[in-house]
Image (spheres, rainbow, N blue to C red):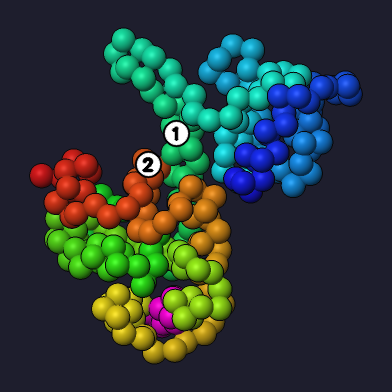
Amino acid sequence: MKKIMGAALMIAAGFTTVVQADNGADMIEKNLKKIDARIQVKSIGDAPISGMHEVELQSGEVVYSDSKGEYFLIGKLYQFTDKDGFVNLTEKKQSAQRKEQIAAIPEEQMVIYPAEGELKATVNIFTDIDCPYCRKLHDEVPALTKMGVQVNYLAFPRNGAGTATYKNMVSIWCAEGDDKRREAMDVAKSGGNPEAKSCENPVMDQLALGQVMGVTGTPAMVLEDGRLLPGYVPAAQLGKMLGIK
């Protein structure tokens, strides 16, 4: 949907409104549908800028529009304050979205490595079992759990369904019980093949969710506040980012 939105709104600058609607939200949604019928609007509310609307799409994107749906702003919206400097308001909105989306995932649909002792933080990691940096990060999971970080794995088979990676990830998610899932994950991350399993599973749903959240590669971490950290981050550095001493 992100490609759809980007391509569709390239023509928005020349788009002229001719149909009146009951209110601004109706007009915005109608005009977006005229640009591309595949665009799905999740919500429309007031933007931080007076006279503008914030449009949240089902794809996870956030765009801005005037009340007539005639002008659209695509990209990041920043606010400057003397206290904080430039604040990325679009990212704040998307972080809130990610936090809500992660909270809606049942723990039984994750592969969880619990913290040792006191729980100090949780990281949610979209992973592909075959990517080198995912394996490098996995080697540091014991260090993370030892410092009080719970690691929740979500599936992100980069090459999609039907691949060997996908089938192995299904086997991991279909392993019976938390211990068996962790065992299967450890085997896969070390280059082996977990015992083949099949069941109803969330692997492709989690891949789609990651794409909505803005994940384009693995590993990708979603922190408790919804921030997205793309790429590998060493355990010691991640601990500092999480405020763990």
Residue designated by label 1: 91
Q: Residue at x 45, y 26 (%)?
A: 89
Q: Kindly indicate whether the residue at mark 1 contacts the one at mark 2 (C-beta within 8 angstroms).
A: yes
* Residue 55 lies in quadrant: top right
Q: Is residue 160 above or below residue 193?
A: above
Q: What element does badge 1 sit on? A: helix
Task: Check disc 2 and report the residue beneath it.
Answer: 227
Q: As rendered, which of 186 and 103 lies closer to the eye?
A: 186
Q: Which of the 4 image quadrants contains residue 58?
A: top right
> In this rendering, does residue 120 appear at all?
no
Q: Name the foreground residue: 209 vs 16.
A: 16
Residue at the right extreme?
A: 19
Residue positioned 38% across, 23% down in the render? 87
Q: Which amino acid does label 2 sit on?
A: Arg
Q: Which residue is drawn at 49% across and 55% down?
A: 210
Residue 152 higher or lower than 33, as above or below: below
Write the start and end of the magenta stretch as one range.
Answer: 168-178
Return the x and y of residue 4 as percentages of the image width and height.
66, 45
Distance (Cα) linking label 2 and label 1: 8 Å
Percent of width and height locating residue 236: 14, 51
Residue 93 highlighted magenta (yes or no)? no
